[in-house]
Amino acid sequence: MSEQIISAELVSSHNAARKADLERDYASLGERLDRRGIAIDAIRDKVEKFGVAIPSWGVGTGGTRFARFPGPGEPRDIFDKIEDCAVISQLTRATPTVSLHIPWDKADPNRLKQAASRFGLGFDAMNSNTFSDAKDQKLSYKFGSLSHADAGTRRQAVEHNLECIEIGKTLGSKALTVWIGDGSNFPGQVNFAKAFERYLDAMREIYAGLPADWRLFTEHKMYEPAFYSTVVQDWGTNYIIAKELGDKAYCLVDLGHHAPNVNIEMIVSRLIQFGKLGGFHFNDSKYGDDDLDAGSIDPYRLFLVFNELVDAELSGAKGFNPAHMLDQSHNVTDPIESLMLSAVEVQRAYAQALLVDRKALEGFQEENDALMATQTLKSAYRTDVEPILAMARLRTGGAIDPVAAYREAGYRAKVAAERPAVAGGGGGIV
């Protein structure tokens, strides 16, 4: 049996005080869904099986380009991070895996695997880092990595990615995510075509190092840290990369990596249609790559993304197997609380998308009935599925109200007493 950080007695007491109300709410929602021809238990069963990975770096306090303000009880190393991730998993039952970032999380792979297995956690995609310089690194990535003009720097970046694959093989990971910050800040600084060709050549070497059962995810981002041009700037370039590399290469969609007002759900549809959707980094944004909590700004967009995902799931789209991960920066909240709520919001969007009357929607689309088509989506979105999510947590051993249970447990105060305080005043993201 997996070890639990929050006492089972506390979770049991927490749930006992809320179970009767939940059962009444669940029964009431079940009656209303039944009138729409929807079996609530079938939706609940799907929600129970749905999971999203926690990024190891997400449990630390984030920052901005101007400052970082550390929070109490910040994890000192990857092993503290795994414990924080275990708390999220225990209370939400929606986050069964952790995604590591190398070299930030570099440690003996067997020790990492043992630490995670204590809590029943697995490992999701490995993430390489060639967008910042590590301690004792021979060559700098200040002017790029996989697309750098210097062959030695490119070789160093390739070798780092191959090392990430080797670590992941021991951990049981099955994917590598590659995001680079390569680009330029001034017109004329780089030759666009040469930089992209160097990138493709380097990625071909990395791709060749993939085990047969692995996938390679490439991630696009229109700006930051490069502000004039970015080597992998949008989903079109990302799609070209995936097609160039081969069948194991897929596009990763980060919800914050697009220009304002871009129709992300349509991008998702296109990538599904042509078999190149690899997965997601879920977050939310108001202006750019804000890395805010999932569903905190535009929950309807999150629902519309999942509408496309559920449509592909139910229609049996070929090769459809997207990976799901949160990718957020928590500057003013407790990271554990934010990640718990984000995991729940992703589940919420999934459950709502499962409620869409797809037969009716298709009919309205064929009849060009725009009003009723959009109202069909809105009917599902407006449905309060909280009783389904809470019942799924209860049945799988989680907390009916994860944040309330977490605060009752006093976990943050406990680790704050055990972990040395981190000095503030530094700039940059964690």
Image (spheres, rainbow, N blue to C red):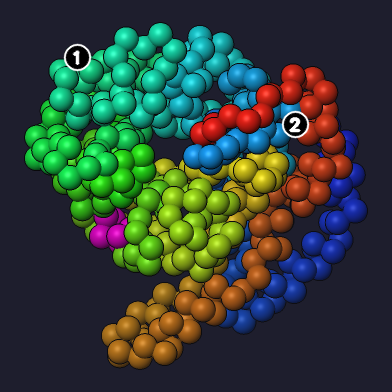
**Residue 148 magenta-highlighted:** no
Residue 362, above or below 118: below
Q: Secondary structure at mark 2?
A: loop
> Residue 236 at x, y = what percent?
21, 53
**Left or right position of 299 against 130:** right
Q: Residue at x 78, y 26 (%)?
A: 415
Q: Mark number for residue 72?
A: 2
**Residue 395 in sight here:** no
| Residue nearer the viewer, 55 or 397 | 55
Q: Residue at x 27, y 20 (%)?
A: 157
Q: Are marks 2 and 1 in contact (CB under 8 Å)?
A: no
**Residue 386 in sight here:** yes
**Magenta-highlighted residues:** 267-272
> Residue 305 at x, y = what percent?
42, 62
Give the quarter of the image for residue 18. bottom right
Q: Residue at x 35, y 79 (%)?
A: 362
Distance of mark 2 from mark 1, alpha carbons? 41 Å
Q: Residue at x 51, y 55 (%)?
A: 284
Q: Dot 1 surroundings within 10 Å: few (below 14), some, or many (20 or more)?
A: few
| Residue nearer the viewer, 48 or 134 | 134
> Residue 183 at x, y = what percent?
25, 38
**Left or right position of 242 against 172:** left
Q: Secondary structure at mark 1?
A: helix
Residue 5, above or below 155: below
Residue type beneath disc 1: Gly
**Residue 269 magenta-highlighted:** yes
Residue type beneath disc 2: Pro
Residue 385, above or below 95: below
Q: Dot 2 surroundings within 10 Å: few (below 14), some, or many (20 or more)?
A: some
- Quadrant into which the N terminus falls: top right
Q: Mark number for residue 152?
A: 1
